[in-house]
């Protein structure tokens, strides 16, 4: 069973206490940065909108880092892994789901999405209240962001922000590498799962290792890490709409889902999400 803090963090697997603290520290750092809360609330509820390539690229990037295509592969693969753990080894055995299983999955997804967006919000808030407010808008690495934060928000905010970045990185990097491995092995019909030992799934773990090595090479090659993260999020935002359309079509089909098909509300929320992301992607290309 998940503890209350696990539910809050949207994660029901094992998470070291230090990692939990790292995630919460990002939120604490925002308060130590002493932003102008009146302006924060106003900007949150009444956002400034402008027609420019930089603004729309940022908007697409936020959408892409919230609904990322790689998460579709990761979430689906982890659901299969959990069912295998309880003895459902064949596709036939894994067909269907009980009301309790769907309830747990819904809670997992909702809390996970809520907390991830909450952390993202406070990271944006911290950097906006300190770096951007003081004219520092060109940051190439996470270490630069943390160092630039120190004289503006104090040592406490700097330390917590640094710990938060390290913690979120420790959570994010394995998911990114693992999702890439799942996607490639499924497409190539290779054997691959994190439950296997490396000698039984050499190609799967080879992709995980290659992804990690490529990331290190790009970092040591001097390519701006923050810009890479930004444009990868934008790319996710551009690629997501077609996948969302496929997911909505599949999950809304009674022929495929039976009694578990989407309700009218969920179906139209799915279509609205696909349309908004598609329009944002088109607007991005129109302004470039």
Image: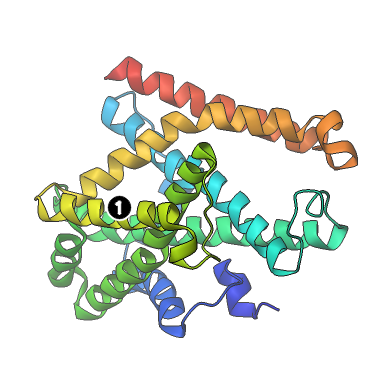
Q: Quadrant of residue 286?
A: top left
Residue 109 vertical position relative to residue 196 in the rendered view, above or below: above
Residue 21, position as x, y percentages in the image: 42, 80
- Is residue 39 at all visible to an observer of this figure? no
Please indicate whether residue 193 sits to the left or right of residue 280 in the image: right
What is the number of callouts on the image?
1
- In this view, the residue in front, 23 or 171, is 171
Seen as rendered, the residue at the extreme bottom is: 17
Residue at image location 86% in from the left, 31% down from the top: 254
Please indicate whether residue 112 sits to the left or right of residue 106 in the image: left
Q: Quadrant of residue 13?
A: bottom right
Dot 1 crowding, Cα within 10 Å, few <14, some 14–19, many 20+ = few
Seen as rendered, the residue at the extreme right is: 259
Say what secondary structure mark 1 lies in: helix
- In this view, the residue in front, 238 or 87, is 87
Seen as rendered, the residue at the extreme front is: 199
Residue at image location 69% in from the left, 68% down from the top: 85
Quadrant occupied by the N terminus: bottom right
- Is residue 191 at all visible to an observer of this figure? yes
- In this view, the residue in front, 105 or 282, is 105
Identify residue for label 1: 210
Residue 246, position as x, y percentages in the image: 63, 29
Please indicate whether residue 93 sits to the left or right of residue 163 in the image: right
Residue 257, position as x, y percentages in the image: 82, 37
Residue at image location 35% in from the left, 23% down from the top: 284
Residue 114 vertical position relative to residue 92 in the rendered view, above or below: below
- In this view, the residue in front, 71 or 114, is 71
Residue 221, position as x, y percentages in the image: 10, 50
């Amino acid at each position: 069973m998940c503890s209350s803090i696990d539910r809050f963090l949207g994660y029901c697997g094992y998470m070291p206490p230090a990692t939990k603290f790292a995630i919460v520290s990002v939120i604490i750092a925002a308060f130590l940065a002493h932003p102008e809360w009146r302006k924060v609330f106003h900007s949150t509820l009444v956002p400034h909108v402008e027609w420019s390539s930089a603004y729309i690229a940022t908007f697409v990037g936020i959408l892409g880092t919230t609904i990322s295509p790689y998460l579709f592969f990761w979430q689906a693969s982890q659901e299969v892994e959990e069912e295998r753990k309880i003895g459902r080894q064949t596709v036939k055995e894994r067909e269907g789901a009980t009301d309790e299983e769907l309830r747990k999955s819904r809670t997992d997804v909702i809390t996970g999405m809520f907390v991830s967006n909450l952390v993202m919000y406070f990271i944006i808030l911290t950097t906006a209240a300190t770096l951007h407010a003081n004219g520092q808008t060109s940051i190439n690495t996470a270490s630069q962001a943390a160092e630039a934060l120190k004289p503006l928000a104090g040592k406490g905010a700097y330390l917590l922000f640094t710990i938060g970045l390290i913690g979120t990185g420790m959570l994010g990097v394995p998911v990114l590498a693992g999702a890439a491995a799942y996607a490639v092995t499924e497409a190539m019909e290779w054997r691959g799962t994190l439950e296997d030992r490396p000698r039984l799934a050499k190609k799967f773990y080879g992709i995980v290792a290659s992804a990690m090595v490529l990331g290190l090479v790009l970092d040591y090659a001097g390519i701006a890490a923050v810009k890479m993260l930004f444009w990868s999020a934008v790319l996710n935002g551009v690629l997501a709409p077609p996948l969302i359309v496929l997911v909505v079509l599949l999950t809304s089909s009674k022929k495929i889902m039976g009694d578990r098909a989407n309700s009218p509300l969920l179906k139209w929320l799915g279509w609205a999400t696909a349309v908004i992301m598609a329009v944002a992607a088109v607007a991005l290309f129109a302004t470039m």
